């Protein structure tokens, strides 16, 4: 395969109907050159997409603590790779948040994040 070069600048095109594991929605489409490259490599029609960099993953310390109480081998926080870790809330309440504020910044919650079980 020829080398595929992808710009670090966010693409302008949106791909709707993207499905990754249990999640589906819109993502940023890397364009036709990337599509042709991956389609040829994988042997089936494919698109290369990336998630919007404005999305963040939030986790509550209490949620992790509650999970670890039920596990034989507790898991560390880096297994979830959150962008923001919040302390002082009820376990799993982040699943119900529609938005939250940190100082002057408001974050809108849009979906639960499904992680690979591996």
Image: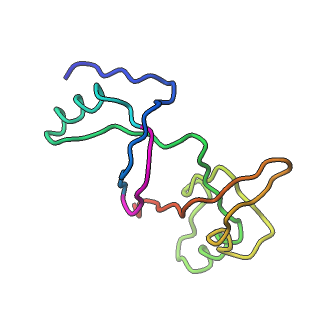
Q: Position of residue 20 (x, y in %)?
A: 37, 54
Look at 61% across and 70% down and name the residue there: 95
Look at 54% across and 62% down and name the residue there: 111
Q: Position of residue 11 (x, y in %)?
A: 46, 30
Q: For this rendering, which residue is in front, 13 or 85?
A: 13
Q: Quadrant of residue 101?
A: bottom right
Q: In the rendered structure, which segment of residues is drawn in magenta?
A: 21-28
Q: What colour scheme governs how the chains and residues are painted in the rendered image of this protein?
A: rainbow
95 w.r.t. 113: above or below:
below
Q: How many marks?
A: 0
The extreme right residue here reads 103
Main secondary structure along the magenta-highlighted residues: strand
Q: Quadrant of residue 108?
A: bottom right
The extreme left residue here reads 43
Could you tell me which quadrant the C terminus lies in? bottom left
Q: Position of residue 8 (x, y in %)?
A: 49, 24
115 w.r.t. 30: above or below:
below
Q: Quadrant of residue 42?
A: top left
Q: Is 24 in the magenta?
A: yes
């Amino acid at each position: 395969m020829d080398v595929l070069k992808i710009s670090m600048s966010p693409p302008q095109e949106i791909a709707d109907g993207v499905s990754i594991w249990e999640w589906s929605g819109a993502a940023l489409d890397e364009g036709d050159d990337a599509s042709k490259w991956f389609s040829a490599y994988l042997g089936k029609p494919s698109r290369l997409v990336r998630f919007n960099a404005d999305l963040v993953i939030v986790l509550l310390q209490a949620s992790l603590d509650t999970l670890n109480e039920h596990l034989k081998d507790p898991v560390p926080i880096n297994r979830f790779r959150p962008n923001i870790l919040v302390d002082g809330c009820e376990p799993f309440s982040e699943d119900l948040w529609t938005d939250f504020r940190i100082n002057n910044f408001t974050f809108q919650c849009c979906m639960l994040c499904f992680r690979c079980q591996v």
